[in-house]
């Protein structure tokens, strides 16, 4: 499998006329090698050129991880004295003849720390974004990846159901978020969650990316819970909205509009449709209900080893959907000072349409 992934990387680099790529610790490096490294003060990086086997530069204390690599790697290890690191990088990179080379890096991953060592080792090299290569590399999920995402969704759903009896008047957002985190870990999520749960009640629910606060739940609140789990690195990212007691008629109306928009976005998800068409299908429902100005974000984003990755589901994206693409459909309406609604599901494009991984009820639940 890993050899197949490197072969795919090789072909994509040739297509984009990129002879060398350097990867920091992160999803792409893990995808290719099966190795997980943390971004820390000791820089690690994978160097791959079209003419040479992959080379991993890493600190000595991380060498034991090489035994679990899915592919044969050359390695160059350095000791803990930072004054020796520049020379270590020069010696490791010299055989690759990267002078005058154009090197691709991941813009969201490469830090100044690593870039500085590379520039000192090969000062005449130039750098460019490797995103056209790395985005396509992981865009279509294999069956084992899809299975892990299904499992992550099941862990996430079970964990939410476990904590719902605790969600009641007077309980604050931070407490709910903490309990949900505990249940995610108990139910089998990887220790590193995709993100910390968003729990937002009342007026706070109009903030799509709220950090949970000490505000207690009150009667008449909408409550947005956005949470996720990981299974062997693969992400789930779900959202459901609840009512705390009876809510007023407008809040009920925006809930119904979002529920219908979610359904429309999922129905539009099929091979050959564009990402932009999925966004428009969901957005049209909300605009038709008179709340278009209050749907302030794209309809969805890709999922995989990252909780935000291609494909991005936004108006104007002409990317044609293909079997194996996995992403969220998460329309929302946010009324400042009053409350918001978001309903988010995870799906994969199939040969005949799409499969929605998540099956939690989308009907309004009153807690």
Image (spheres, grey):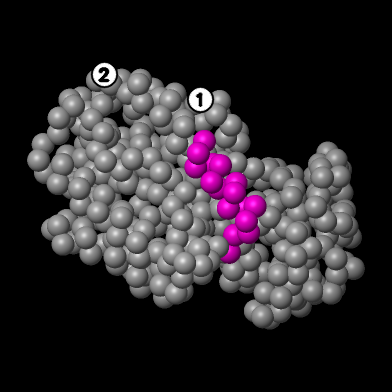
Distance from disc 2 to disc 1, alpha carbons, whole Å, reads 20 Å
Per the rendered image, the range of residues in magenta is: 140-155
Label 2 packing within 10 angstroms: few (<14), some (14-19), many (20+): few
What x and y, as percent, mark residue 169?
24, 20
Compared with 64, 49 (above or below) is below
Determine the main secondary structure of the stretch shown in magenta.
Answer: helix
Vertical order, 159 against 56 (above or below): above
The residue wearing badge 2 is: 170
Tell me where residue 224 sits by quadrant.
top left
Percent position of residue 3, x then y: 79, 63
Which residue is drawn at the image coordinates 48% and 37% (left, top)? 156
Q: Could you say where residue 304 lies in the image, as x and y percent from the top left?
A: 56, 53
Q: Is residue 280 left or right of residue 29?
A: left
- Quadrant where the N terminus sits is bottom right
Q: Residue at x 43, y 45 (%)?
A: 358
Q: Is residue 194 visible?
A: no
Q: Which residue is mark 1?
A: 182
Numbered disc 2: secondary structure: loop
Measuring 64% from the left and 43% from the top, which residue is drawn there?
A: 232
């Amino acid at each position: 499998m890993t050899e197949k992934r490197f072969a795919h990387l090789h072909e994509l680099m040739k297509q984009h006329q990129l002879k060398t790529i350097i990867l920091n610790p992160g999803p792409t490096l893990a995808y290719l090698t099966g190795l997980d490294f943390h971004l820390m003060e000791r820089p690690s990086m994978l160097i791959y050129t079209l003419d040479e086997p992959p080379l991993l530069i890493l600190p000595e204390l991380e060498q034991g991880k090489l035994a679990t690599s899915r592919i044969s790697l050359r390695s160059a290890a350095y000791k803990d004295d930072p004054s020796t690191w520049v020379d270590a990088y020069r010696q490791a990179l010299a055989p690759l003849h990267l002078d005058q080379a154009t090197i691709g890096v991941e813009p969201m991953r490469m830090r100044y720390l690593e870039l500085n060592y590379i520039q000192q080792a090969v000062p005449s090299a130039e750098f460019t974004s490797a995103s056209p290569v790395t985005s396509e590399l992981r865009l279509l999920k294999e069956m084992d990846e899809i299975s892990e995402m299904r499992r992550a969704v099941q862990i996430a759903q079970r964990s939410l159901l476990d904590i719902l009896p605790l969600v009641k008047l007077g309980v604050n957002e931070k407490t709910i978020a903490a309990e949900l985190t505990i249940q995610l870990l108990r139910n089998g999520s990887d220790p590193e969650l995709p993100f910390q749960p968003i729990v937002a009640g009342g007026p706070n629910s109009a903030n799509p990316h709220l950090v949970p606060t000490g505000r207690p739940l009150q009667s008449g609140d909408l409550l947005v819970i956005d949470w996720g789990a990981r299974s062997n690195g693969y992400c789930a990212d779900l959202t459901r909205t609840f009512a705390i007691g009876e809510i007023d008629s407008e809040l009920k109306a925006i809930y119904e509009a979002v529920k219908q928009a979610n359904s429309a976005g999922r129905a539009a998800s099929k091979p050959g449709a564009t990402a932009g068409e999925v966004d428009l299908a969901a957005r049209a429902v909300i605009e038709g209900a008179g709340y278009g100005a209050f749907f302030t974000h794209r309809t969805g984003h890709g999922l995989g080893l990252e909780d935000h990755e291609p494909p991005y589901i936004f108006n104007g994206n002409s990317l044609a959907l293909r079997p194996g693409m996995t992403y969220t459909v998460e329309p929302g309406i946010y009324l400042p000072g009053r409350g918001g609604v978001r309903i988010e599901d995870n799906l994969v494009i199939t040969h005949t349409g799409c499969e929605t991984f998540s099956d939690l009820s989308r009907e309004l639940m009153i807690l």
